[in-house]
């Protein structure tokens, strides 16, 4: 008998167990669940993944009818793995959440967080937003069980995905939560490493003040080389020194951080001089000089008024008299004599006829 025929036989037995008769008032969910599980195993061996997944879902429903939460969650978890084999991950988040809820009802929240972690790893490359929600719930689940170390691991994955997606505001909050979880277990090296990551995230946000506050708050957990590098980095941003900032970002411990934070450091915008002296000459793309929209209007109005006054003056009867009338000299004050204009010497007086005769007479006597 082939595996397909064996699986079909188990399905028939499961359907028979679910039927009710006059003497059998309640379906036998235990037998049906076992038969569906056996059929799913046969279909998996035969690599018929779609029917395998259908049988697992039916088995999970039967276990839920019997209030067997743990076995129902196990079947959902198996169906999740089958979806991975089929490369059809659209239903993966919903199956992971259902399995986690059933594990929590059974009293095994750690198992529920493990299922969420498995589903998130499947979706992290193709659907990071869905993986983000799964990691967040996994962190909340284990944090409720007073396991801050495990919660910090899940929150670390949340922060790295947020940095990868460029959601720096939420990434800063996730890093702060991770720092708080490590503080609960008093793990100082991790807090120091996360302080560096928080400074980088705040600089990526463009908030230099927040980066300095993060260093002042958590910098005492850092080692001496880390403190020196962060001081150099923040000082370079204060002085707008791109070379010093680049040198600080190329430090060995930043390069050997987690991949996402190392990539963030490589792509961090360097400081630039905001108040550089502009080059001499015409400024590029400068706005044109301001010209009042009433300038032409006022000039035209003044011209019209001048022409009207000139016409009135010409048409007046005393126009010629006014023109021929010599200009009167301006009275000069007695205390200040008027300056004499520079003129040519006066011409010699004309000699009269009598004066000429007298000159001739005197010449004769001599």
Image (cartoon, helix red, strand yellow):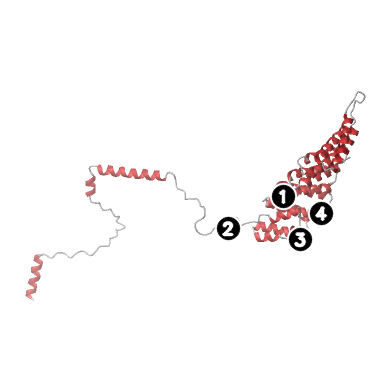
Instruction: Decide if residue 311 is in sight here.
Output: yes
Tag 3–tag 1 contact (CB < 8 Å): no
How crowded is the residue under tag 2: few (<14 C-alpha within 10 Å), some, or many (20+)? few
Report x, y in % for residue 99: 83, 39
| Residue 96 percent coordinates (x, y) | 81, 41
Q: Are marks 3 and 2 in contact (CB under 8 Å)?
A: no
| Real-space CA distance between mark 1 and mark 2, rounded to the nearest whole angstrom | 34 Å
Upstream in the sequence, badge 4 or badge 2? 4
Q: Identify the residue at the far right of this view.
A: 23
Q: Say if 120 sits above or below 31 in the image.
A: below
View extreme (bottom): residue? 366
Which residue is depicted at the point 82% across and 38% down? 51
Residue at which label 3 appears: 225
Mark number displayed over residue 164: 1
Name the residue carrying label 4: 188
Towards the viewer: 121 or 35: 35
Alpha-carbon span between mark 3 and mark 2: 33 Å
Whole-percent x, y for residue 123 in the image: 76, 45
Which one is closest to the eye, mark 1 or mark 2? 1
Disc 4 from disc 3: Cα separation: 15 Å
Q: Quadrant of the N terminus?
A: top right
Whether label 1 touches label 4, CB < 8 Å: no
Q: CA distance from mark 1 to mark 4?
A: 25 Å
Q: Residue furthest front?
A: 1
Q: Secondary structure at mark 3?
A: helix
N-terminal label among 1 and 4? 1
- Which residue position is annotated with label 2? 276
Residue situated in front as seen by the camera: 324 or 76: 76
């Amino acid at each position: 008998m082939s595996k397909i025929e064996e699986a079909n036989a188990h399905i028939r037995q499961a359907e028979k167990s679910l039927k009710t008769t006059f003497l059998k008032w309640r379906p036998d969910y235990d037998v049906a669940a076992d038969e569906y599980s056996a059929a799913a195993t046969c279909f998996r061996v035969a690599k018929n993944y779609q029917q395998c997944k259908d049988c697992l879902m039916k088995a999970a429903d039967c276990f839920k009818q019997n209030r067997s939460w743990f076995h129902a969650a196990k079947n959902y978890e198996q169906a999740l793995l089958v979806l991975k084999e089929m490369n059809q991950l659209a239903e993966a988040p919903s199956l992971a959440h259902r399995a986690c809820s059933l594990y929590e009802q059974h009293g095994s929240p750690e198992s529920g967080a493990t299922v969420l972690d498995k589903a998130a790893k499947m979706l992290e490359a193709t659907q990071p937003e869905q993986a983000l929600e799964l990691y967040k719930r996994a962190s909340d689940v284990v944090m409720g069980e007073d396991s801050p170390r495990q919660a910090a691991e899940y929150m670390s994955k949340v922060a790295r995905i947020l940095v990868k997606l460029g959601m720096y505001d939420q990434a800063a909050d996730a890093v702060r939560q991770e720092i708080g979880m490590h503080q609960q277990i008093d793990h100082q090296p991790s807090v120091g490493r996360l302080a560096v990551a928080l400074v980088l995230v705040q600089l990526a946000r463009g908030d230099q003040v927040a980066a300095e506050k993060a260093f002042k708050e958590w910098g005492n957990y850092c080692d001496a080389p880390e403190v020196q590098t962060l001081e150099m980095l923040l000082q370079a941003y204060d002085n707008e020194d791109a070379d010093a900032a680049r040198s600080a970002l190329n430090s060995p411990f930043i390069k050997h951080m987690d991949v996402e934070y190392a990539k963030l450091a490589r792509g961090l915008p360097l400081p630039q001089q905001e108040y550089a002296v502009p080059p001499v000459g015409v400024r590029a793309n400068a706005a044109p000089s301001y010209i009042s929209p009433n300038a032409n209007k006022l000039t035209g109005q003044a011209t019209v008024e001048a022409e009207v006054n000139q016409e009135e003056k010409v048409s007046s009867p005393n126009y010629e008299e006014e023109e021929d009338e010599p200009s009167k000299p301006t009275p000069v004050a007695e205390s200040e004599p008027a300056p004499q204009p520079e003129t040519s010497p006066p011409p010699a007086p004309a000699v009269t006829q009598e004066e000429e005769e007298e000159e001739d007479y005197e010449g004769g006597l001599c």
